[in-house]
Amino acid sequence: MQITLQKSEIAKQSSIQITGSKSESNRLLLLKALYPQFNLENISNSDDSNLMTKALSSSSDVVDIHHAGTAMRFLTAFFAVQEGREVTLTGSKRMKERPIQILVEALQELGADIEYVENSGYPPIKIKGKKLTKNKVSLQANVSSQYISALLLIASRLENGLELTLEGKITSVPYINMTLSLLTEIGVENSFEGNTIVVKPAPKDLEAKTLVVESDWSSASYYFSLAALSAVGIEITLSSYKENSLQGDSALVEIYRHFGVETAFNNNSVTLTKTDKDVLPFTYDLTNAPDIAQTIAVTCFALGIKCDLTGLHTLKIKETDRLVALKTEIEKLGGQVEITDASLHLAEAKSIKSDVAIATYHDHRMAMAFAPIALKTSVIIEDAMVVSKSYPTFWDDLESIGFKITK
Ligand SMILES: O=C(O)C1=C[C@@H](OP(=O)(O)O)[C@@H](O)[C@H](O)C1
Ligand SMILES: C=C(OP(=O)(O)O)C(=O)O
């Protein structure tokens, strides 16, 4: 479905409740499948988390996780240790282009039985679950941290735990730390020193407890962008967030200060306020927070400032090639963008074209990142329901704060 966002203004003060972090939810859902004594609150209502829940409770021999990358990677490790179970894990056309070889090889090294069904190195894969007896493996860490998190999530169930040696520059480190922090929270001992991660087997008597998922910071990014493009004094309150987040995308607080957005933490919420700060050209390395690259690029374009983003090497293998998608769509709006395999350079823009139809490439973040353009001029978003991958109520929430949307 295509929607038109007419030129809009947002309310002077507004508040939004955002669903639980997709990343935390998908980790905790898997851990709950291993340790059913845990009770989970504020689990994400995203398609990706619903698919994860469904897959973990399915008894079918074919499990289809559509576009959900973390689910694909985490479930590969999960099914590899389900003794006696045989599962073919598959996904969307794009999922079949997203590499999984580094994870499959690490699991095979530990003794897992996994075969490629179509193309070597890519889903679908056929997994025959078995007991893994080895406990040491090395893997390349510069392609996706999801491979590492997948291994860490099953590590405490291996009889001797797991020692991982990470090769090369480690990418998306906060996501690895998130996995380790959640293991600590449930009572599993672990350490991460230099390039070595050690996870101990879980104690026999892991205590039952309630784990509360913080709301999703990547979803919050679109409100930081809205605040940055709004009039001075606009306030947006988002919940439920905490100052010491496990999510690396909470770097938004520091990043958006540069664009005149001040963030205050109160109880369980954050309030974003647009100030009159002068906005200057922006340079940033997003190796630790790749999912907010699209949001930031569009904010800078709409503010009319130059921006240089680096550390974007993982963007080519996400829901779409996000570097090419950003260049194509920003240029439709009149911007000028240069990309390499790992960086994006945006020239200062003088104006924004109206009524441009933004293609979304089955990528939720393309749809959501371009929505704030509507504060400057009317814009069309193609295949708008793609947002449900991480944030199903996104368009309703924008309407509730003043957006004029025609379907
Ligand atoms: O572990 C996770 O929950 C994620 C890790 C990141 O992937 P990469 O490590 O592949 O960059 C991120 O982009 C993705 O949206 C979620
Ligand atoms: C890259 C993302 O998700 P995944 O890799 O889990 O599909 C994302 O949500 O931006």
Image (tube, rainbow, N blue to C red):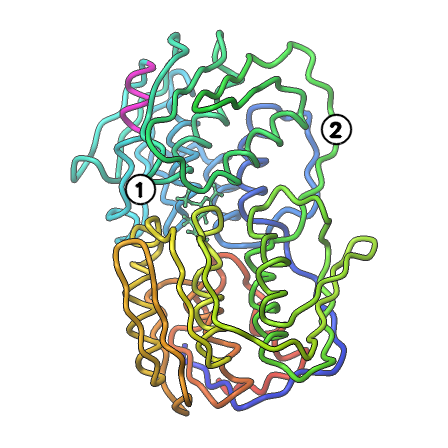
The residue positioned 41% from the left and 16% from the top of the image is: 83
Q: Position of residue 30 (x, y in %)?
A: 53, 32
Residue 108 within the magenta-colored segment of the rendering = yes
Image quarter of residue 380: bottom left
Considering depth in this image, is 13 or 169 the residue closer to the camera? 169
The residue positioned 26% from the left and 39% from the top of the image is: 124
Considering depth in this image, is 75 or 253 the residue closer to the camera? 253
* Residue position marked by numbered label 2 in the rendering: 209
What secondary structure predominates along the stretch shown in magenta?
A: helix
* Residue position marked by numbered label 1 in the rendering: 90
Q: Position of residue 280 (x, y in %)?
A: 52, 73
Q: Position of residue 251 (x, y in %)?
A: 59, 53
| C-alpha separation, residue under disc 1 versus residue under disc 2 | 33 Å
> Left of 362 or right of it: where is 364?
right
Q: Which range is magenta?
A: 104-110
Amino acid type of the residue tagged 1 in the rendering: Thr
> Left of 262 or right of it: where is 60?
left
Q: Are marks 1 and 2 in contact (CB under 8 Å)?
A: no
| Picture layout, residue 407 above or below residue 156 | below
Determine whether the residue tagged by mark 2 lies in a helix, strand or loop.
loop
The residue positioned 55% from the left and 12% from the top of the image is: 201
| Picture layout, residue 335 above or below residue 391 | below
- Closer to the camera: disc 1 or disc 2? 2
Q: Which mark is residue 149?
A: none
| Picture layout, residue 327 above or below residue 98 | below
The residue positioned 31% from the left and 13% from the top of the image is: 111
Image quarter of residue 142: top left
Determine whether the residue tagged by mark 1 lies in a helix, strand or loop.
strand
Image quarter of residue 88: top left
